[in-house]
């Protein structure tokens, strides 16, 4: 197989950037977007990419990093399953914990987010605790995300459990989207600030790739992979305005969340947010690992077609509606 991606080059640059950011602060809360293990989508789009390269990266950080897992209480209650493996979010959480232990990566605990007395979530917490895993609870916040006075108070983030950590890099991840990773990071910034500790937030990203063109097939393939989430790649307007028209690629959810982060940061820290855009928040050196753009473009186009064909089968068998099919067709057309 002809290779389009160099894992070692990527690992070097990604880990160096994480360490650089951590060195600027007493503690870095690093939200991990995407799959921590078995990132087969990335492997299909980037021939040569190791599906478990993120595990290798965590191992390379050695005793500087530890892990916090988030799982939304409502997903436990609903027995939500991952679309790719068919496993429940609880099963995926247990699998992640076991994998981390096998690879020598410290797991600080599991946060059950937006917990509101869910009985099934309590049962899962007992399973975790019986296995020696610490469990923490974060609660729904009234008026989130607009009532900043409540959010940034002891009735908001302050009501959530504090997670005691020891290492300078705290990786915050979860079994799937909507697990509460972002809110957990901001909760911890609140608690650290109240304790007089210096801490910061950043986001580990794989896709979309900020320094590739908006319509690069690799970025389009990200849209194809997140059709159910309605993710849409966009030119980051905050970056464009802050950096004199500099064009950087981001996606709708991060672009929408950025003003909230900025306002919360400034209210909590009492200082101007150091990030002028959501792109600034991200740590993403995927482009540095691409060694053959032609191969990557071709593989990404194939991935878009594969995703469309899967949606077409689902539509024909009644598992997808016309809107989903139309979105899949529209995304596939972008990759041509």
Image (cartoon, grey):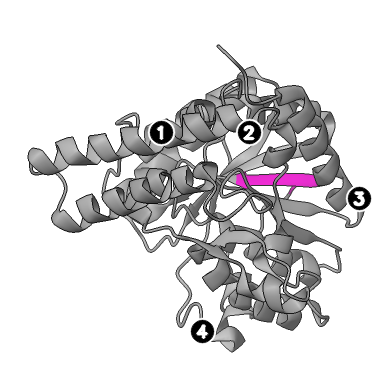
Q: Residue 278, percent across and down?
A: 66, 65
Badge 2 crowding class, 10 Å Cα cut-off, few under 14, some 14 to 19, many 20 or more, is some
In the image: residue 271, left or right of residue 175: right
Residue 127 in view in this figure: no
Which numbered mark, 2 or 3, is in the foreground of this view?
Answer: 2
Q: Residue 192, percent across and down?
A: 77, 64
- Please, what secondary structure does the residue beneath circle 3 have? helix
In the image: residue 3, left or right of residue 299: right
- Please, what secondary structure does the residue beneath circle 1 have? helix
Of pointers 4 and 2, the one earlier in the residue sequence: 4
Q: Residue 178, percent across and down?
A: 44, 55
Q: CA distance from mark 2 to mark 1?
A: 15 Å
Residue 318: say if magenta: no
Of pointers 2 and 3, the one earlier in the residue sequence: 3
The residue shown at (73%, 30%) is 57
- Please, what secondary structure does the residue beneath circle 2 have? helix
Contact check, label 1 and label 3, Cβ < 8 Å: no
Of pointers 2 and 1, the one earlier in the residue sequence: 2
Contact check, label 2 and label 1, Cβ < 8 Å: no
Q: Quadrant of the N terminus?
A: top right
Q: Quadrant of the C terminus?
A: top left
Q: Is residue 252 above or below residue 91?
A: below
Find the magenta span and give its range.
Answer: 165-172
The residue shown at (56%, 69%) is 255
Specify the label residue 293 is tagged with: 2
Q: Is residue 315 above or below residue 196?
A: above
- Please, what secondary structure does the residue beneath circle 4 have? loop
Badge 4 crowding class, 10 Å Cα cut-off, few under 14, some 14 to 19, many 20 or more, is few
Which numbered mark, 4 or 1, is in the foreground of this view?
Answer: 1
Specify the label residue 23 is tagged with: 3
Query: Which residue position holds label 1?
Result: 303
The residue shown at (47%, 48%) is 220
């Amino acid at each position: 197989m002809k290779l389009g991606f160099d894992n070692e080059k990527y690992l070097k640059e990604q880990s160096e950037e994480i360490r650089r950011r951590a060195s600027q602060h007493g503690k870095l809360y690093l939200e991990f977007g995407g799959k921590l293990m078995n990132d087969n989508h990335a492997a299909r789009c980037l021939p040569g990419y190791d599906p478990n390269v993120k595990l290798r990266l965590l191992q390379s950080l050695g005793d500087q990093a530890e892990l916090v897992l988030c799982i939304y209480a409502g997903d436990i209650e609903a027995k939500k399953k991952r679309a790719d493996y068919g496993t429940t979010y609880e099963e995926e959480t247990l699998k992640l914990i076991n994998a981390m232990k096998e690879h020598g990566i410290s797991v600080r605990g599991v946060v059950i987010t937006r917990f509101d007395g869910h009985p099934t979530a309590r049962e899962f917490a007992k399973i975790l605790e019986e296995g020696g895993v610490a469990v923490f609870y974060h609660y729904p916040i009234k008026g989130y995300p607009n009532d900043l006075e409540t959010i940034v108070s002891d009735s908001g983030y302050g009501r959530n459990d504090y997670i005691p950590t020891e290492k300078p890099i705290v990786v915050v991840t979860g079994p799937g989207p909507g697990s509460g990773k972002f809110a957990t990071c901001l909760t911890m910034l609140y608690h650290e600030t109240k304790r007089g500790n210096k801490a910061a937030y950043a986001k580990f990203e794989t896709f979309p790739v900020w320094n590739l063109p908006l319509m690069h097939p690799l970025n389009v393939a990200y849209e194809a992979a997140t059709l159910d989430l309605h993710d849409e790649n966009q030119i980051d307007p905050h970056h464009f305005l802050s950096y004199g028209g500099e064009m950087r690629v981001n996606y709708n959810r991060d672009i929408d969340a950025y003003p909230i982060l900025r306002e919360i940061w400034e209210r909590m820290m009492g200082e101007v947010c150091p990030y002028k855009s959501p792109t600034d928040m991200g740590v993403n050196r995927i482009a540095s690992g691409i060694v053959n753009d032609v191969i990557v473009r071709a593989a990404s186009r194939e991935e878009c077609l594969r995703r469309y064909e899967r949606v077409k089968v689902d539509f024909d068998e009644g598992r997808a509606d016309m809107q989903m099919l139309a979105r899949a067709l529209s995304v596939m057309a972008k990759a041509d």
